[in-house]
Amino acid sequence: MALQDSIRDHLVAVIGEFVGTFLFLFFAFASAQTANQPNAPGVLASGPDSARFLYISFAFSVSLAVNVWIFFRVSGGLFNPAVTLALCVVGIVPFVRAVFVTLAQISGGMAAAVAVRSIIPGDSVLFGVKLASGVTIAQGFFMEMFLTFELVITILMLAGEKTKATFLAPIAIGLALFIAHLAGVFWTGAGINPARAFGSSVAELSFPGYHWIYWFGPFAGALLAAALYKLLKILHYEEVNGDQDKSDDEQAVQPLLSRQTERIEMYLRMARPQSWRNSRREEEVWPLVSPRRARSPDAPQALRLYRLSGLDDYKSEASFNSRSSERRRNRSPSFRSRYEDPEMGYGR
């Protein structure tokens, strides 16, 4: 069993390092390649205007971060059919909700595009998406796929997983979109979001023949991110670095708690060997240990630490698993409060 856990831990680490290194260098290399495009004839495209692309990237990322933070507790702050698809596949968003949310996102994208087209003066739509000169449809498809993958895996790992850093997820999501735009806005317009691409095309009244890549590319990236997320969950990735979300105090308490737990189990084996043999699983003994049987001076301290550690409540109904459990439940509230209070002592 220990060997299998070790192999699993190594596999999770290998997957994490491979995917992380790939994404880190993909966006770094793509951004450098984009920024260093020369203004010379015979190349794929003229060099980019770095200030303009930084402006666009910053605007999209900050707008997403702010609005995700606003609507995070309202609807989840998805704003993207590809993100909705990924969350539906992993089981976070129900299918029916995903359908209605996707329709709302597409409608919102069209409304925003038409509003900007109507309010800001000009004869043409300048916020549309299109492939740069020399970029093939296949290249555009895979660019959109990887850009969306980066955004979706960020959402799944930071917003889909509830940790102490979840409240900072909108910032990380905005940064993910920022780096995605830096890498892809020059080549494909960085659609990433089918609602964004479709809305701008509606406002422009123009749908190029390759418009489909702005749908299937993000959807492919979302499914790829969902597959990676499910694989990591199956491998229990959170156990590989399980203490990274714990504070220093929690990590300091854990060894003492483990030692006290072992002592409680030893006392139980000595006092009730038959009960121990009948209780095969560890969780049936701890925290299901009757406090009255924990007569060691260390037991009250261990139980207090157990309660403070955030684990399951040791005062659960199942903890009264002795023959007199029914009689204990029928006793007066004053007796129960004294009996269950560690400060009052156990076994009195």
Image (cartoon, grey):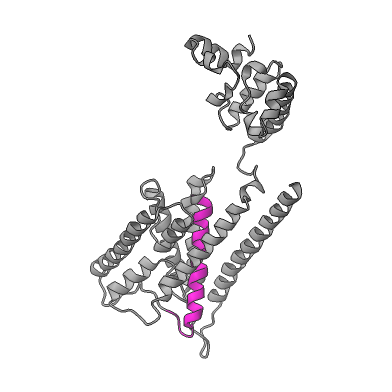
Examine the residues drawn in magenta and state their main secondary structure.
Answer: helix
Q: Nearer the viewer, residue 222 or 277?
A: 277
Q: Residue at left 45%, top 75%?
A: 188
Return the x and y of residue 319 as percentages of the image width and height.
58, 24
Q: Identify which residue, 146 or 285, lies in the foreground.
A: 285
348 left or right of 259? left
Task: Give the vertical position of 95 relative to 166 (above or below).
Answer: below
Q: Residue at 48% of width from left, 45% of height from top? A: 167
Residue 182 x, y percent position in the rendering: 50, 68
Q: Using residue 236 as the reference point, say whether residue 53 is left or right of it.
A: left
Q: Quadrant of the C terminus?
A: top right
Q: Is residue 249 visible?
A: no
- Residue 210 showing in the rendered view: yes
The residue under the point 69% across, 59% down is 14
Residue range in magenta is 131-159
Horizontal side, residue 129 vs residue 320: left or right: left
Task: Point out the residue furthest to the bottom here.
Answer: 42
Q: Position of residue 127 (x, y in %)?
A: 35, 71
| Image quadrant assignment for residue 79 | bottom left
Residue 290: percent from left, percent from top: 62, 20
From this view, report whether residue 316 is shown above or below residue 82.
Answer: above
Q: Is residue 137 magenta?
A: yes
Q: Residue at x 32, y 69 (%)?
A: 199
Given residues 338 and 324, the one toward you in this image is 324
